[in-house]
Image (cartoon, rainbow, N blue to C red):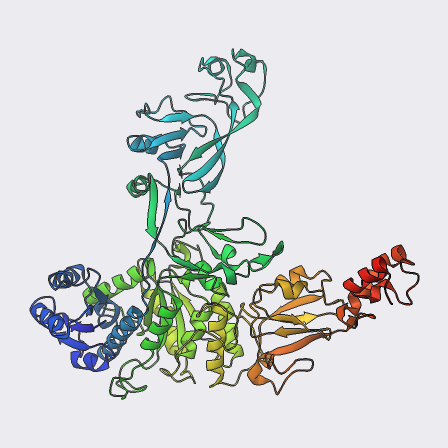
């Protein structure tokens, strides 16, 4: 792929040093600049496309008109419609930073965009067929608005509809109150309670003779209506004061007065105020839905559970859209149609069983590394610390929804009214701050960032609700402090109106709290794996985090031997209750536990993802998992093999329990732990006493094969 970068000076309104930007751009086939690209520079762009046979353009263009003119050039040149990628050098750099920092940042953004394009995923789609059944709860206006395009059922939900001046002739009106909604897009089921059965013939006798609150259209009796003789007026015995329950099937549900059952809402299930956008969304999904696939799934490496034991619950706990469920206690199921691309499950998953397709972790890593490298193609450093450019590189993971829009608006305000400047953080656009986990932050620090800012919507997050990253920030600041780096992570939410608080908090973080990182920028390139790891996808959270921690430890002396705050790591404590049953070794999804023929239990801290399956499944409750990354258990920090560990396993393994295997008195084969044999002897010994009177040994001292031979073939002892 031949790539060209084009830099625009916006008619001198940006204050960028175009020559310096060109010098700072790496790897692309050609870099060109113009004082006003969208006007007189377009012919030059077409010429460069032709001369260098370009397939992809990276263009600094901020407003829609300029971007459209570039797209027209792309079209005229016969390139793919998506062959132009844009960098916001104005609102995101030149208008809110000084000229040197903005010039440096623009070059870095162009480099990061190029690096990201090299890792762009091939698009694919997911789909689900559905009907046109729409259930509307208590909102006749919305029901009428959809009646021409959908098969609408209006559940009155206690509302009197006789006095509503709306045409409901094409709407199926149902009595009752909705007490629950289950299912998913295309297969919802509403549970409706009512004190009037379907035997009602609308004679309205109960309305005339009953208490206040009984409605006429449809006939409904409120839950607080008193019982009495008036209930006998119904000629069809349709009044059931104890209540009846029925269920209504629907492909989509509109329930304005309900609280969302998930933090971020579900596809096809609409709560809150209904507006034109809601109606349009419902109509667009009639008949089914086709949408981009947001996830890559590799369930063979999932640590969710096994053998009816629940293990890792990270993805189900994290998903704010009810797109991840547990059909059984030891399995996980993803509804890709319900997924809304926030990345919460992917940043939480330690094994890589679920991975975000765009941006992938690999793409994010490459963009971060490009942003933190200020070296030009000649090997020189265009901007050095303490001179010009960005003196304190801080990576900012920016939510591409509200937070990105607000930062763009801050830039426009700076151009018109002035007074809006903030430190030149290096932005990496993510779908939502939910995309960001401990692996992303630790990698940015390993790549040389002085700090990491997570920039999101705050209390108005469209996915996770209030304080979506408070817990993550607290945890990671514990980890960075334990590593000897001090606290280097912060969460920031640009306000919708006044930028003052955001600017003050970000400036205090960057300028006052952070000092220069001891880790050099531009040297670390992540592979997202660890040596000797089980077969897991690259850039899974656990392996990627550990790789980054190791890169950090090359430059720091940690304050603690056990790094707290990293949830993907755990170490095993085994009590004397262990009988060496194979449960933990069979359950472990990462092969981090082994039982030896000598009766020892071995543990590999490097592989363990802290899913808890071994602890939960242990029949003797002998295992306790402790949180944290214990540096002393990593192979590079150990001198030789641990006791009881063979050389072929390597230094990553440690013995966590020293047991004894029972050898068969007949064939000599070890067949069970001595503790297991003693336990079984205590439990059933009396019941089998004397079962083999001719043998000088207890039946518990024989392996299964020899015991069978002893009891049924009467062979030698």
The answer, for residue 654, to whether it is visible in the render is yes
* Relative height, residue 523 to residue 285 (above, below): below
Figure quadrant of the C terminus: bottom right
Q: Position of residue 512 (x, y in %)?
A: 40, 78
Q: Name the image quarter holding the N terminus.
A: bottom left
Does residue 369 appear to the left or right of 28 in the view shown?
A: right
Res. 414 in view = no
How many numbered badges does the structure rendering display? Answer: 0
Residue in front for this viewpoint, 628 or 639: 639
Asked which quadrant contains residue 517, the reply is: bottom left
48 on left or right of 289: left
Please give left or right for residue 477 compared with residue 53 in the image.
right
Determine the image quadrant of residue 376.
Answer: bottom left
Relative image position of residue 95 (x, y in whole percent): 22, 70
Estimate the x, y position of residue 20 in percent, counting from the top left: 20, 82
Q: Nearer the viewer, residue 469 or 265?
A: 265
244 up-or-down from 68: above or below? above
- Answer above or below: position of 224 versus 299: above
Out of 681 and 97, give the one closest to the viewer: 681
Q: Residue 509: name its quadrant.
A: bottom left
Name the residue: 44% across, 15% down.
Answer: 202
> What residue do we see at 38% from left, 65% from top?
360
Residue at image point 43% right, 62% down: 355
**Vertical order, 71 against 18 (above or below):** above
Q: Measured from the top left, where is residue 385 in percent x and y?
A: 32, 86
């Amino acid at each position: 792929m031949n790539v060209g970068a084009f830099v625009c000076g916006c008619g001198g309104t940006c204050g960028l040093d175009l020559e310096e930007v060109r010098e700072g751009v790496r790897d692309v086939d050609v870099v060109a600049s113009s004082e006003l690209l969208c006007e007189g520079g377009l012919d030059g762009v077409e010429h460069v496309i032709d001369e260098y046979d370009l397939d992809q353009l990276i263009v600094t263009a901020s407003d829609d008109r300029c971007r459209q003119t570039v797209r027209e050039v792309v079209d005229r040149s016969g390139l793919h419609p998506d062959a132009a990628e844009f960098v916001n050098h104005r609102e995101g750099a030149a208008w809110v930073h000084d000229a040197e920092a903005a010039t440096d940042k623009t070059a870095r953004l162009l480099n990061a965009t190029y690096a990201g394009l090299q890792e762009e995923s091939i698009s694919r789609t997911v789909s689900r067929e559905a009907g046109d059944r729409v259930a509307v709860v208590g909102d006749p206006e919305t029901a009428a608005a959809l009646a021409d395009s959908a098969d609408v059922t209006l559940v009155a939900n206690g509302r009197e509809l006789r006095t509503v001046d709306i045409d409901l002739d094409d709407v199926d009106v149902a009595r009752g109150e909705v007490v629950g909604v289950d299912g998913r897009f295309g297969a919802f089921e509403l549970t409706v309670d009512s004190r009037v059965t379907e035997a009602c013939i609308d004679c309205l006798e109960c309305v005339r003779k009953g208490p206040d609150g009984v409605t006429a259209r449809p006939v409904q009796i409120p839950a607080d209506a008193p019982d009495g003789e008036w209930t006998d007026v119904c000629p069809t015995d349709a009044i059931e004061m104890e209540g009846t329950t029925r269920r209504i099937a629907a492909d989509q549900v509109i329930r304005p007065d309900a609280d969302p059952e998930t933090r971020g809402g579900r596809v096809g299930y609409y709560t809150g105020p209904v507006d034109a956008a809601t109606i349009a969304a419902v109509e667009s999904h009639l008949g089914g839905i086709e949408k981009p696939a947001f996830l890559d799934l590799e369930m063979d490496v999932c640590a969710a559970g096994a053998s009816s034991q629940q293990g890792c619950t990270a993805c189900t706990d994290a998903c704010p859209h009810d797109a991840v469920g547990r059909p059984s206690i030891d399995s996980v199921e993803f509804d890709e149609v319900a997924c809304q691309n926030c990345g919460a499950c992917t940043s939480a998953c330690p094994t890589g069983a679920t991975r975000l397709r765009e941006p992938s972790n690999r793409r994010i890593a490459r963009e971060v590394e490009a942003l933190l490298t200020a070296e030009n193609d000649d090997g020189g450093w265009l901007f050095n610390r303490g001179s010009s450019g960005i003196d304190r590189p801080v990576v900012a993971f920016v939510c591409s929804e509200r937070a990105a829009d607000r930062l763009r608006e801050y830039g426009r305000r700076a151009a018109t009214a002035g007074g809006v400047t903030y430190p030149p953080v290096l932005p990496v656009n993510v779908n939502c701050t939910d995309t960001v986990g401990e692996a992303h932050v630790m990698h940015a620090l390993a790549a040389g960032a002085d700090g990491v800012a997570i920039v999101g919507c705050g209390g108005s997050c469209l996915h996770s609700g209030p304080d979506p990253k408070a817990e993550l920030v607290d945890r990671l600041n514990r980890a960075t402090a334990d590593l000897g780096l001090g606290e280097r992570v912060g969460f920031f939410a640009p306000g919708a109106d006044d930028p003052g608080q955001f600017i003050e908090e970000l400036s205090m973080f960057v300028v006052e709290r952070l000092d220069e990182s001891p880790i050099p920028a531009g040297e670390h390139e992540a592979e997202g794996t660890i040596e000797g790891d089980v077969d897991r996808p690259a850039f899974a959270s656990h392996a990627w985090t550990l790789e980054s921690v190791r890169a950090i430890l090359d430059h720091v002396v940690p304050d603690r031997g056990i790094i707290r705050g990293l949830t993907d790591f755990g170490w095993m404590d085994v009590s004397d209750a262990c009988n060496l049953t194979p449960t933990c070794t069979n359950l472990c999804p990462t092969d981090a536990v082994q039982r030896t023929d000598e009766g020892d239990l071995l543990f590999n801290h490097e592989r363990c993802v802290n899913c808890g399956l071994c602890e939960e499944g242990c029949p003797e409750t002998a295992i306790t998992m402790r949180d944290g990354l214990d540096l002393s258990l990593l192979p590079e920090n150990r001198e030789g093999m641990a006791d009881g560990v063979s050389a072929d396993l390597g230094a990553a393994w440690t013995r966590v329990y020293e047991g004894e295997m029972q050898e068969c008195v007949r064939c000599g084969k070890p067949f069970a732990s001595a503790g297991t044999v003693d336990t079984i002897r205590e439990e059933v010994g009396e019941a089998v006493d004397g079962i083999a009177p001719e043998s000088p040994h207890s039946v518990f001292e024989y392996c299964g094969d020899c015991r069978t031979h002893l009891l049924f073939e009467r062979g030698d002892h």
